[in-house]
């Protein structure tokens, strides 16, 4: 007869696995939506972000766009939260260096929002890695009316 002893590590470890279980199901599904991303011509950090998403199971097509600002405006992304690149994923817009886990969470929760954004190019975000250097940043949930709020905070 096996006897299991619960301790803090066992409980917390189990909780983290359970918390990630819904996202793991999405990441393994063949039904992840394809992502088409547009960047300023030749931007290398955008390609690193795309590699981060590919590692999470997304199909990503990166394209250069010398008129990225106009594309972003047409997509409904508020100018004050513009990121490095603009991506289309099904009905959602993904603006800037949004981590794959946040995109998976958005898909899992099925928000009726415009999408997610990371303002600017924060050091330590996917594609902007610089060793151990990190700066705090927010992933913003963009609404279709132009409003937005914090979806996830990274310290």
Image (cartoon, helix red, strand yellow):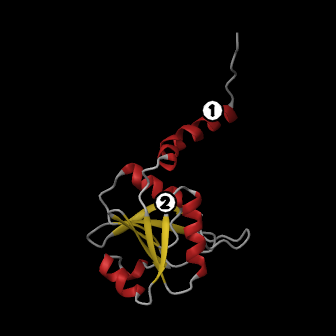
Q: Which mark is residue 11?
A: 1
Residue projecting furthest to the top? 1
Residue under the point 43% across and 62% down: 34
Residue projecting furthest to the bottom? 66
Q: Residues within 10 Å of mark 2 (few under 14, many from 20)?
A: some
Q: Is residue 24 visible?
A: yes
Q: Nearer the viewer, residue 46 or 97?
A: 46
Residue under the point 47% across and 42% down: 22
Q: CA distance from mark 1 to mark 2?
A: 24 Å
Q: Is residue 148 above or below residue 100?
A: below
Residue ID for mark 2: 152
Q: Nearer the viewer, residue 65 or 4?
A: 65
Position of 6 compared to 87: left or right? Answer: right
Image quarter hosting the C terminus: bottom right
State the image quarter where residue 93 is shown: bottom left
Residue under the point 32% across and 66% down: 114
Q: Position of residue 61 (x, y in %)?
A: 48, 70
Q: Nearer the viewer, residue 22 or 152?
A: 22
Q: What element does badge 2 sit on?
A: strand
Q: Position of residue 125 (x, y in %)?
A: 59, 69
Residue under the point 41% across and 58% down: 33
Q: Position of residue 9 (x, y in %)?
A: 69, 35
Q: What element does badge 1 sit on?
A: helix
């Amino acid at each position: 007869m096996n006897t299991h002893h619960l301790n803090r590590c066992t409980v917390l470890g189990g909780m983290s696995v359970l918390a990630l279980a819904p996202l793991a199901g999405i990441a393994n599904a063949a039904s992840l939506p394809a992502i088409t991303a547009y960047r300023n011509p030749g931007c290398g950090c955008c390609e690193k972000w795309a590699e981060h998403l590919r590692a999470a199971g997304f199909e990503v097509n990166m394209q250069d766009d010398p008129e990225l600002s106009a594309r972003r405006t047409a997509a409904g992304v508020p100018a004050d939260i513009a990121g490095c690149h603009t991506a289309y994923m099904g009905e959602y817009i993904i603006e800037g260096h949004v981590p794959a886990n946040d995109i998976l969470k958005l898909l899992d929760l099925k928000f009726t929002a415009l999408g997610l954004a990371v303002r600017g190019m924060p050091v330590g975000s996917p594609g902007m890695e610089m060793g151990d250097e990190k700066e705090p940043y927010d992933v913003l949930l963009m609404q279709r009316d132009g409003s937005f709020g914090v979806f996830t905070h990274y310290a």
